[in-house]
Amino acid sequence: MDDIHKKIKEIRLEQGLTLKDLSEKTSLSVSFLSQIERGASSVAITSLKKIADAFGVTMTFFFEEQVNSNYHVKSEQQRPFQVEGSATSFVRLGGEFPKRSLEPMIVKLAPNQKKEQTFSHPGEEFYYVLKGAALFEIAGEEYFVRQGESIHFPSHIEHEYENPLSEETMLLCVLTPVIF
């Protein structure tokens, strides 16, 4: 996570883009992009997704040093990570290969974790509650999803989630498009 700002600047320069060009492609301000590149500001997952899309890369590009070219992902290769400013923890489960379209992962919500951000993006999302429960809000309607239950919806609809329990909640998530 510490080198994301360096990677953003590096790929922008490699692609011959100015900060203004990147701003136009992402709808993020030039000053905000400049702060990100200098490491003076953290970047939210939605902003990072816009930047990745503008560069034509997956979000994985910013997190991994080496690309896993195996279809089989062993447990020791599954490393949790967090997006700065979020209590949510993610573990990528999918292999790495060209043109993959699914992003399977484990999502861990901290006890009593409140809604952090509203999401809306192309694709679809599927969640299966492995442990605990989660409260999803999709297009303003709430769904309380318990252990052993699932929820599946188009991602372009505004959505967010929280953990109303005093224990960790663990979700199996499969979404499109690939974001990490």
Image (cartoon, grey):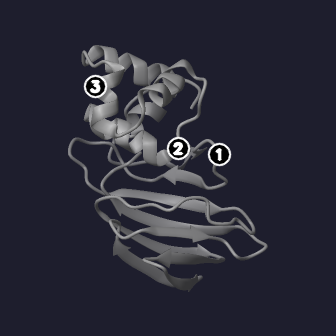
Name the amino acid type tagged 2: Ala
Q: Is residue 172 above or below residue 26?
A: below
- The location of residue 145, given as percent across then percent down, is 55, 83
Nearer-N-terminus badge (1/3):
3
What element does badge 3 sit on?
helix
Q: Residues within 10 Å of mark 1 (few under 14, many from 20)?
A: few
Q: Pick out the residue farthest to the right.
A: 166
Write the residue at 29% across / 62% down: 123
- Mark 1 touches mark 3? (CB < 8 Å): no
Q: Residue 1, position in %: x, y? A: 56, 32
Q: Callout 1: helix, strand or loop? A: loop
Figure label count: 3
> In 3D space, how far apart are the residues under numbered discs 1 and 3 (Cα atoms)?
27 Å
Name the amino acid type tagged 1: Gly
Residue at numbered disc 1? 85
The answer to whether residue 4 is above or below residue 167 is above
Q: Which amino acid, mark 3?
A: Asp
- 24 with respect to 168 (left or right): left
Q: Is residue 161 left or right of residue 69?
A: right
Residue carrying label 3 = 21
Q: Are marks 2 and 1 in contact (CB under 8 Å)?
A: yes
Q: Which residue in the structure is indicated by mark 2? A: 44
Give the position of the C terminus as an image quadrant: top left
Dot 2 alpha-carbon crowd within 10 angstroms: few under 14, some 14 to 19, many 20 or more? few
Name the residue nearer the viewer: 40 or 109. Answer: 40
Residue 87 lies in quadrant: bottom right
Task: Give 172 or 152, whichever is nearer the viewer.
Answer: 152
Image location (x, y in percent) of residue 165:
73, 76
